[in-house]
C-alpha cells in the first residue's frame, strides 16, 4: 500500500483539472494550434512513462500495473496520432490556396450570345 493517502492524490488530481481548464480557455485563438502541438508532445512523454510501467520487473507475466501500462500506451498512441492529424488539418486551413485559371467563355461567343 502507498504511504500517500488517497485524499492527497485526489486533491492534486482535482486541482490539475481546474488549472488545465483555465489554461486552455484562457488561450487566444492564435495560440491554440501551438498549444495543441505541445499537448501532443506531452502525450509522447506519457507514452514513455507507460512503457516503463509495462515492463515486468518482478518476473510475473501480467501484473495489474503492466496491464494498465499497456492500456495507457494504446490510448496515448491514439491521442498522439489523432492530435497530429487534427493539427495538420488546422494548419492546412491557413495555407494560401492556388489561384484557378480564368474560365474561357467560348460557349457564349460560339452560340451568338453577347460576349
Image (tube, rainbow, N blue to C red):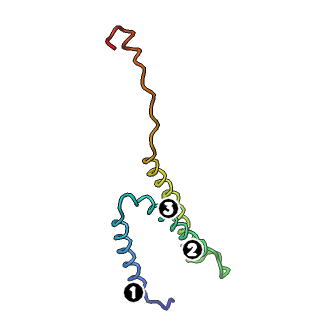
Q: State the image quarter where residue 104 is shown.
A: top left
- Dot 1 or dot 2, earlier in sequence: 1
Residue drawn 56% across the image and 77% down it: 65
Tell me residue 36's x, y (percent). 45, 61
Task: Find residue 57 and name its label.
Answer: none
Cα–Cα span, label 3 and label 2: 15 Å
Q: State the image quarter where residue 50 is shown.
A: bottom right
Task: Find residue 79 and name its label.
Answer: 3
Q: In the displayed structure, does residue 31 sit left or right of residue 72?
A: left
Cα–Cα span, label 1 and label 2: 23 Å
Cα–Cα span, label 1 and label 3: 29 Å
> How would you rate the neighbour count of disc 3 (Cα within 10 Å): few for under 14, some for 14-19, many for 20 or more?
some
Q: Quadrant of the C terminus?
A: top left
Residue drawn 45% across the image and 31% down it: 100
> How would you rate the neighbour count of disc 2 (Cα within 10 Å): few for under 14, some for 14-19, many for 20 or more?
some
Q: In the displayed structure, does residue 88 sit left or right of residue 54?
A: left
- Dot 1 or dot 3, earlier in sequence: 1
Q: Are marks 1 and 2 in contact (CB under 8 Å)?
A: no
- Dot 3 or dot 2, earlier in sequence: 2
> How would you rate the neighbour count of disc 1 (Cα within 10 Å): few for under 14, some for 14-19, many for 20 or more?
few
Q: State the image quarter where residue 11 is shown.
A: bottom left
Q: Looking at the picture, does residue 47 appear above or below residue 111?
A: below
Task: Find residue 7 and name its label.
Answer: 1
Amino acid at each position: 500500500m502507498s504511504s500517500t493517502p488517497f485524499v492527497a492524490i485526489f486533491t492534486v488530481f482535482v486541482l490539475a483539472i481546474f488549472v488545465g481548464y483555465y489554461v486552455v480557455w484562457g488561450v487566444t485563438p492564435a495560440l491554440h494550434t501551438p498549444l495543441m502541438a505541445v499537448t501532443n508532445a506531452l502525450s509522447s512523454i506519457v507514452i514513455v512513462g507507460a512503457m516503463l510501467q509495462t515492463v515486468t520487473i518482478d518476473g510475473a507475466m501480467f501484473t495489474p500495473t503492466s496491464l494498465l501500462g499497456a492500456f495507457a500506451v494504446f490510448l496515448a498512441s491514439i491521442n498522439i496520432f489523432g492530435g497530429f492529424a487534427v493539427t495538420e488539418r488546422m494548419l492546412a486551413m491557413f495555407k494560401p490556396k492556388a489561384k484557378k485559371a480564368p474560365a474561357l467563355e467560348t460557349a457564349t461567343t460560339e452560340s451568338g450570345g453577347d460576349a
